[in-house]
Amino acid sequence: MEHKIINNFLEKNEFLNLKNIFTQFNFPWFFVKGINSVTDSYYQFVHLFYFENNVNSEFFKELSPLIKKLKIRSLIKIKANLLLKNKKIIEHGYHCDFNYSDSKTAVFYINTNDGYTKFKNGFISKSKENKIIIFNSNEEHTGTTCTDSDYRIVINLNYF
């Protein structure tokens, strides 16, 4: 599968409802040391919605427009990542989300900024709100920080 990019993925009102959730004062973000491993020197804030057959978030139901539109049959993992503004763009190292040959990863961008998702083959998907990129979960890619926004938020969905 090549990279499938869809701009304006959700209807405007669905997207704005979802975006507003992540910027509420009561939305729980959790500090995680290490982005690709606990030994790297990076950090991010995450919110785990779903993992290992368990819903882990009271906000899970808010993702239903994404899940329905992607026509997900079975979930593996859903989490949101928040990276704070940096003085320079930092790539965090290539990784693959899962090694299942038939699973998909979707990265859904919550806000527009100069951060991006980069693939080992050199392809770059820029962060643009309400855009999604879909690819095989075993494809190596990396995320980045941003310099022109206070934060970069993406939702990472892994599924069949």
Image (tube, rainbow, N blue to C red):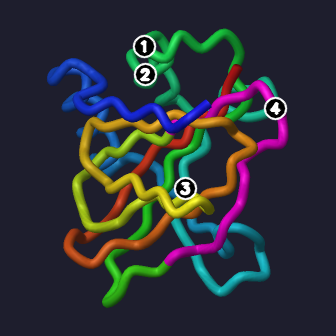
Amino acid type of the residue tagged 2 in the rendering: Leu
Name the main secondary structure of what is drawn in magenta: loop
Residue 17 drawn in magenta: no
| Residue corresponding to mark 2 | 66
Task: Determine which residue is flagged by label 3.
Answer: 46
Label at residue 101: 4
| Mark with earlier residue (2, 3) | 3
Q: Residue at x 50, y 47 (%)?
A: 80
Q: Position of residue 64 (x, y in %)?
A: 45, 16
In depth, the one of 115 and 43 nearer the eye is 115
Q: Nearer the viewer, mark 1 or mark 3?
A: 1
**Residue situated in front as seen by the camera: 120 or 59:** 120
Q: Residues within 10 Å of mark 3 (few under 14, many from 20)?
A: many
Q: Is residue 64 above or below residue 60?
A: above
**Residue plotted at (75% across, 44% down):** 138
- Real-space Cα distance between discs 1 and 4? 22 Å
Circle 3: residue type: Val
User: Which quadrant does the N terminus fall into?
Assistant: top right
Which residue is at 47% across, 30% downward? 59
- Specify the quadrant of the image occupied by residue 98: top right
Q: Amino acid at mark 4?
A: Ser
Pair 3/4: label in front: 4
| For marks 4 and 2 on the same chain, the one whose residue lies earlier in the sequence | 2
> Which numbered mark, 2 or 3, is in the foreground of this view?
2
